[in-house]
Structure formats: C-alpha cells, structure tokens
Image (cartoon, rainbow, N blue to C red):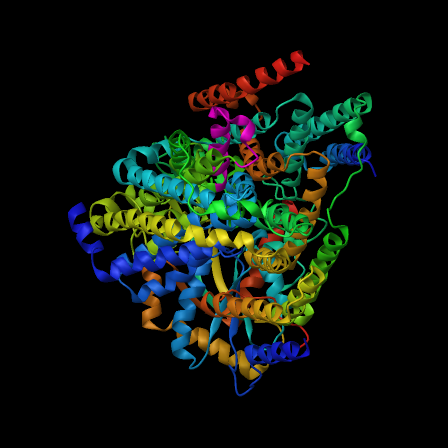
Amino acid sequence: MIFQALQSLMTPTSLFAVFAGTVSGVFVGGMPGLTATMAVALLIPVTFTLEPLTGLILMGGVYCGAMYGGSIPAILLRTPGTPAAVATALEGYPMSQKGHGGLALKVSVISSFVGGTFSVLILLLIAPILAQFALIFGPPEYFLLAILGLVGIVSMADDENKLIKALISGLLGLIIALIGTDPISGMLRYTMNMTDLYDGVAFLPALIGMFSISQMLELTGTKSIIFEPSTMKKIKREPFPKGLKKFIAIGSATGTIVGLLPGEGATIAAFLSYNFARQHSKNKKLFGKGNPEGVAAAEAGNNGCVGGSLIPTLTLGIPGNSVAAALLGGLLVHGLIPGPELFTKYGVMTYGFILSLFLANLIFLVIGLYMSPYFARIAFTPTELLIPVVCLFSILGSYAMNNSLLDIFVALLCGIGAVILQKTGFSLGALILGLILGPIAETGFSQAMIMGNGNYAIFFDRPQGIILWLIILLLLIPPVIQIFRRHRQK
Amino acid sequence: MTKRLAELLSLSMFLLIAILLYKSTMNFPEVVQNSTAAYVRFLAICFGGLCLLAILLRLKSKSTEENKKLDLAAAPVRFWSLLILMFVYSLLLEPLGFYLASALFLPVTMVVLGARKKILIALTAVGVLLFVYIVFAKLLGVPLPESSLF
Amino acid sequence: MRKFLLLATILFFAFTGLALAGYPAKTIKIIVPSKAGGSTDTSARLFINAAKRHMKGANFVIKNVPGSGGQKGFEEIANSKPDGYTIGMMFTPQIVAHIVSKRARYTLDDFHVMGNMGKDPLIIAVPKNSPFKNLKEFIDAARTKKLTVAVNGIGSDDFVAAKKFENLTGAKFNLLPTKGSTEQKALILGGHVDGSFMNITQLHAQHKAGTAHIIALLDSKRSYILPDLPTAEELGYPVDMTATRGFVTPKGVPEDTAKKLDKLLEDVMNDPEFIAACKKDVIILKHMKGKEYHDYLVGLQAEIQKFFDSTPW
C-alpha cells in the first residue's frame, strides 16, 4: 500500500501541490498575523475542486512550511511570525545582533527539518500505539505538565536575587492569564467589561508587543540591528557548529510527545525543549545571549509537533491543535472519517498524505538553506526604514489575528511594559512562560478538583501523574542545588 | 529616577495587585471556591509574598550598582515619538481605514527616525502598501480595518 | 510628499471601489463568530461556494471574529452598517444565552433573521468500556451517586441539556466544564469522565470506530447519520436539545436587499451540489425561513430564561 501511495505522490500535480503548499506555508508562517490555521481554512473550499489527496497534500505542506517559517522573522527581527517561534527568538535574535543571523537561520532550518522528519516518521510507523498514550493524559496530568513547564523558570535564574525576580515575572504572567472567563463557572473576571478580553488577553498580540514592538523601540537608538557593522563580512559562510545533535534530538522527542497531547501546542513544545536543552547544556552561561543550542532545540521542538499533532487527529479524530483541527475539517469535507479505516480502506490516500509531509520538510530545507544568506541581509537595512515597516506589520498582525482593534493596544502596552520590566531586571522569558502555561495550569487544576470532588489526592494517586512528579523533581533539583552553592560561596 | 526606585515602585505596585487579587476571590461564586478561586488565591499569596521578600532584600542591599539612573531609551526623543506615532496610527485605523492611515504613518515615522531620501521613503511606503493589498486583501481575503468616514 | 499623498488617495479610492450600481456592487462580508476551520466556519465557506452560483457577480469575504462563545461576533453583526454588505452567521443557543445572562449588548430585535441553515442535535456519550450500556443504566446510576459529566462550558447547549435531565429525572451530575469538543472527546476516549453531553457531528466518527459509545440522541427524530441510535424520547426521557446555525443581517437593511439575501439563502439550501457537499461534511441541513426561525429563537430564549432563573451562571 505504501508503494501505491508513493506512486500517487509522484504525479506532477501532487508534487506541485507539495511545493506550492510548503512555499506558501513558509510565507504565511513568516508574516505575523497570518497563521497556518487561516491558510488551511482558506483551502478547504478550494479542495472541493481538487482530488482529495491533492487538497490534503496542499494543507500538509502549509502546516509544515508555516511551522518553520515563523522562525525567520523571529531570528532576524525578534518578531515572532507564530507564537511557537518565540523560544527561537530568545536565542536566535541575539545571534543576529552579533552578526550570526545567517548561521542562526541555518541551524533553525536544519533542526526544523530533523524535528519535522522525525515526528512524521513516528506518525508513519507507530501512530496507533502513541494515540493511546495521548489519551492517558487527563486534567490532573495537564496541570502537572504546566508545572513541569514552569519549573523552567528556576533554571533561567542563576542566583537567588534573580530567582526571586524570575519567579515574580512568572507569576505575573500567570496572573495576566487570569483575565477573561472563569473556565469553570463561566463568570467574567478582570475584563473591565471589554468583550475583546472575555477570552483573555490575546496571545500573539501580547507576544508581538513584548518581543517585536519593544525591540523596535529599543532599536531607535541604533543604526542597524547588528551591534558592530564590522562583522558584516564574516556572515557569509560560517561552519555549522558541532555538538548540536543532542539538542536537536531532545527537541524532536519533546516536540513529538507534546504534539501528541490534544490541545497542547507547538509553543509549549518549543519552550519545553528549550528548557531541557538549557539544563543539559555545557554552555549554560551562553543562554539568552545567542546560543545556537537553544535555537536547535526550540525549532526541532515546534516542528516535531507537526507529526505528533497529526497522530491523534488521524487515528482518533481529536485534533492536536488548531491547525490540525482545520485539517480535520478538510478531511471530513471529503468524507474521510478519522479512525482505523483511514489506514486501511483509504490507506493509499492517508499514506500518500503522510509521505508528502516528508517531501514538504525536504522542500523547506532546500529553500531555507538556499535563501538564508539572503534573508540575513535584512539585518543590514537601516533602522529608519526598517522600524516603521516592522511596526506596521506588527500592528497589522496583532489586528488580523482576531480582527480586533483592542489587540493592537494590547500589543503596544505589552511593548512599553516589556521595556520597563527588562530595564528593572525582571525576566521576560519567565513572564511569557507564565502567560502560555497559565490557562492550562488553571483549567487542569480546576477540572481535576471537580473530578476528584475537591480532594487534592487526585494529583498523587494516578500512576501517570506520579511519573510526571518524578520528572518535575529531576528538573528542579539540579538548579536549586546550584543556586544554594552560589549563595554559600558569597 | 534611579533603577532602585523604579524597582521598588514596580514591586509595590505588584504587591497591591496581589492584595486586590486575593480580595477579589471572595466575590467568586460558591461553586468555584474549591477550584478556580483556590488557584487564584494561591497565585495571589505567592505573588504577594515574593514581592514582599524582594522589597525587603532591595531595602537591605546597598550596592552602588542600583543607584544608577534608569534610562529607558538610548535616544529618548525617537523612542517616545515612535511610541506616540504608533498609538496615533492605531487610533487612526478605524476612521481613516488601513491604507490611508498607513500612507500617513510610514513616511512620517521614517522622517522622524531620520530618513532623508525622498525616493527611498516613497518606494518603501508604496511597496509595503501594495504588498499588503495584493497578499492580505486579494490573495488571502484578510479583512483590513475599514474606514468609517468614506 | 504631496504627490505621494495624492497617489495614496487615488489608490485608496481605487481599492474601495465607489461604483454603486445595483446590489451587490461590492464584496459582501460574512462575519463568522468562530475560529477559522471550525464547523461553523466550514459551513460559511461552503455557503459562499454555492452562493456565487446563485448571485451572479457577487463576491464574498469571511471575517472570523472568534471568542467569548460567539458573543463578540454577534455584537459586531448587530453593530455593523445595515447596507446589505455585512451579513453574519449565528448559532443557538449561544446567541440567546448571552441575552439571557445579560452579557450581550444586543437583543434579538437588532437582527433581521435570514433563516436557518443547519442543525446539530445533542447526544449523550460514555467511554467505550463504561459500565453503563444504555441511557437507563446511566440515569439510574446518576440518581444514587454524582456522575462526572463533561459539558462545553456553562450556559452552552450541553449544559442546558444536562440541566434538563437533572430536572426531569432527579439525577445529579458533577458537571465538568471544558473549553470545547476537542477536550470533551479526549476526556471520553481516555475514560476520565463518566459521560459527556455533546453534538452528534462531533462524536459520530468515534462511535462508528468503536472508541466511544453514544447512548442517546436528544432530538425528536432519529438522525440519518446514526440511524440505529435511539432518541431519548423513545427511551422514556422526553428531553430534546439541538444546536442550530443560521444567517442574520443587522436590522434595517433596505427591504429589497433583504429579500434578495433571503432568496439567496433559499436558493443555496436547494442547490444539489451544496446539499451533496454538506452530506459529506456531515453538516445536517435544516432550512427554516426567516419568520419561522425568528419565532424559534424567541421560544428558545424564553426556555433558557427559565433555566437561568432557577440556576443562574
């Protein structure tokens, strides 16, 4: 059957569809405010006039391409094209500032390719088994997963003063995430009667503000993004740094596993991978100042989500995230109902689709490698032209996400707020981690409390929960010991 | 304003937020007192406690590092004008519509930030607008802010 | 500089297009109060596909206004210019539930109802290895001990259906609100809850694949999607609850334009290609004309008001 699928993929139409899908995906992912979800939804009616396989391939290409595309502006301009690229921006942009933008792009595209390919391989080989794994996660486990992510805050700090500030920043993020509708009672809280806030502070606009707009404000004092223009000539061909394999592997595995969990997104996968990499790195000091290890882990992580999220989508009909949900819509349009039949009766098409994802990964690898020296030139644009244009797209992107004017002001406020917080020594990374994980932590905690009839025991008496507790402890102990040692030395 | 003062100010503001947050959970409905209200109270206590701790540590420490002036921007004039221009632009989006507002925002901001070559300014602005029109409006059908005047 | 402004102005007017010949002279915007790619969004996109065949020269664009259970989108429809170039999708019971809970800044009178397009009846589902094999066992168990049941948020159709069951049978549910059908599916398939109230199109595939078990349909008639599934009424529990999805415009659209739009919906509903497309996507079509649908909405609002008065949320 796989051979047949391969045959159906090797037609000119299919090949063109993969190519067109991937290229437009990279583009859509790279523009803040245009999302893969939007593009896939746009394609659904178009696919009616096409063969079902062609339509699916097109959507799959968009999905793969967009996940990678988000990292390009994140690295070059600190403007996340997708929320998932924020972790990449943490390391990639400092690299650009030092004149290593081209190298960061190269690391990003290779890690994306490996992460994406690995997860699709998993999807191809052991999807049904892993789908069962996704189901053992209930509300208590989601809460613990959020804790697991928040533990990363501790490893972001290196002494107790910074630790306190990082924790305060993380909590501030969690508190901002409270704005909106109470997940249990449906009561509105802290919304100031603004309809646009009923669903909480919109995520992408806040991130655009904190990263892109704050950075553009700071750039007003400089002539170009790169600190020392003298490094300009070196940028051309830099050798690929050694020792990144470990971090790409960490990212790919984390991304695939997190992608599996319904509702958990690539953003969390990227941040978790980033934190794991930070823990395992020998160059911890370099993190936050442009460490290619961070870029590798984060990008492998968010692309690993692609294959991971398709596993529950195709086998159980539970979409792993919003793009997968739109893709599921595309499947249903053609009368393809997720489940075992998809792999037997419609096997040729399903496997054709999965195989096309490999091709999509390959296409963006080639495009990325070929184009990255050209993209990297953006960093040389004089700021007086660059800043207005990036600001315009940041504002347009904040608006286009939910078609809401309020979101623009959210972005602007977050922008100036981020500048102030950073200058007073608070941690932006911790704040964002809190913001991302807040809704999951709260919903998981509250739902678990309802399931357990108000008893905290539910967090401790499920085997899957205990395993998560163990991982949390493993992650927590080393940085805490380190901070204690530093304190003694003083 | 010194860095130390700015820090103390923001920390006390956070402390106030923590107290208000804790108090607000009293008004949560009975059904969630055990779930979401408990979660919010936990956050408020941690947040308030840590802020208090940070304030105490800050008051105790006497490092000279902290007495430096807080400078938000390297080029304050450009920094604040960019921020104000962005606010004005956002406010103008609704009455003027995206294209007209942007056609004003781009050149003005470029000039404020120090661009002097007229051709470059015009080319960039027209290029960006055309790009948005073709890709956002025509190709992807993304609705842009529309004018309420015309 | 001046030249540039002139050029910009010319471009601007060229884009918006000022030619005002007969209706439709410009693009018609459809406000969809949900995320791109969801089933409401898909049905709007299918509608456009068919509508283009029936209204020559018409162009449509979708504006997704997701969030707050559709309220943001409903408000935007109600407040948009009544010139016939903005129409919107709406869904029940959320559109009236927001009015009842006094959150909405609109009333039903702010809309001209074009008509209903589809429906999606509710079901009760249990995990595949649940001890309850049918509705009777499920309800009997709920009478003795609180069963944990997933619903899609407070005030949603699922929630109202669960409350209806509580009122009718004296059963008690431990209601677990979720963020939507994805989460509900995961809870049911993973066996984390005793049961779930949700829509039939959200779970029929899992039922057919054997990964979840649907025990009752809350509709007056059996559904063609799962003809073997008994209705709750057949099983002795007369409860029905259905979500519907229709089209509205803001109030005050010129009468002949409104008529054209109503006619367009009717034409689309009778379009064989559209019907075939909806069958595949398992959107259950149910046409109601404007007047009929408006009456339905008013009735629904009164019904939900009753629940809100007894247990406000």
Res C38 quadrant in image: bottom left
Give x and y (percent) for residue C123.
Answer: 42, 47
Query: Over which residues does the magenta segment extend?
Result: A267-290
Prevailing secondary structure class for the magenta stretch in the rendered image:
helix
Give x and y (percent) for residue A459.
Answer: 52, 23
Q: Is residue B93 above or below residue A302?
A: below
**Quarter of the figure with the C terminus of chain A:** top right
Q: Is residue A254 above or below residue A316?
A: above
Q: State the count of labels.
A: 0
- Outermost residue toward the top in this view: A488
Q: Is residue A20 visible?
A: yes
**Would you say C90 lies left or right of A416 here?**
left
Res A445 quadrant in image: top right
Residue displayed at 64% across by 72% down:
B100
Work out whether residue A14 or residue C222 is closer to the camera in this orientation and state it. A14
Instruction: Please check the rendered image and state whether residue A270 is part of the magenta-colored stretch, yes or no.
Output: yes
Q: Is residue C308 above or below residue A41?
A: above
Give x and y (percent) for residue A249.
Answer: 38, 32
Work out whether residue A352 or residue A103 is closer to the camera in this orientation and state it. A103
Give x and y (percent) for residue A295.
Answer: 47, 38
Work out whether residue A408 or residue C229 is closer to the camera in this orientation and state it. A408
Q: Is residue B33 visible?
A: no
Instruction: Please check the rendered image and state whether residue A373 is part of the magenta-colored stretch, yes or no.
Output: no
**Would you say C246 lies left or right of A314 here?**
right
- Outermost residue toward the bottom in this view: C21
